[in-house]
């Protein structure tokens, strides 16, 4: 399972650790992901999603059904 949010599409990005002596070494900035189960009232079933903290706020704000429709339009949902 990859480190991608299924609601917002956020994924890990690359960068550098910079030491006091200004040496650069590669690193990744990972997404704050959670594996959560949600009850989808419209389909009367439970679903599991990999969701970032921002994705959880989106679901709380606009609702699960609207968030899933948005994610499907943008192509973020995967099995």
Image (tube, rainbow, N blue to C red):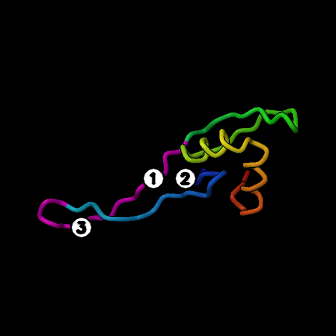
Numbered mark located on residue 24 in the image: 3
Residue tagged by mark 2?
3
Q: Residue at x 70, y 39 (%)?
A: 48
Region of the chain picked out in magenta, as a range: 19-33
Residue tagged by mark 1?
30
- Tag 1: Cα neighbours inside 10 Å, few (<14), some, or many (≥20)? few
Q: Residue at x 72, y 49 (%)?
A: 67
Q: Residue at x 69, y 34 (%)?
A: 37
50 to the left or right of 62: left
* The one of 57 and 40 positioned closer to us in this rendering: 57
Q: Position of residue 75 (x, y in %)?
A: 72, 62
Q: Is residue 24 magenta?
A: yes
Q: Secondary structure at mark 3?
A: strand
| 49 to 78, vertically: above or below | above
Q: Residue at x 60, y 51 (%)?
A: 5
* The one of 57 and 36 positioned closer to us in this rendering: 57
- Tag 2: Cα neighbours inside 10 Å, few (<14), some, or many (≥20)? some
Quarter assignment of residue 74: bottom right
Q: Position of residue 35 (x, y in %)?
A: 60, 38
| 34 to 9, vertically: above or below | above
Disc 1/disc 3 C-alpha distance (Å): 18 Å
Quarter assignment of residue 20: bottom left
Residue reaching furthest right? 43
Disc 1/disc 2 C-alpha distance (Å): 7 Å
């Amino acid at each position: 399972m990859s480190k991608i949010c299924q609601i917002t599409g956020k994924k890990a990005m690359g960068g550098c650790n910079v030491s006091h002596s200004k040496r650069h070494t590669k690193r990744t900035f990972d997404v704050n992901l959670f594996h959560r189960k949600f009850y989808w009232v419209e389909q009367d079933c439970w679903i599991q999603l990999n969701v970032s903290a921002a994705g959880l706020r989106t679901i709380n704000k606009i609702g699960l059904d609207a968030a899933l429709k948005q994610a499907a339009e943008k192509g973020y949902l995967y099995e």
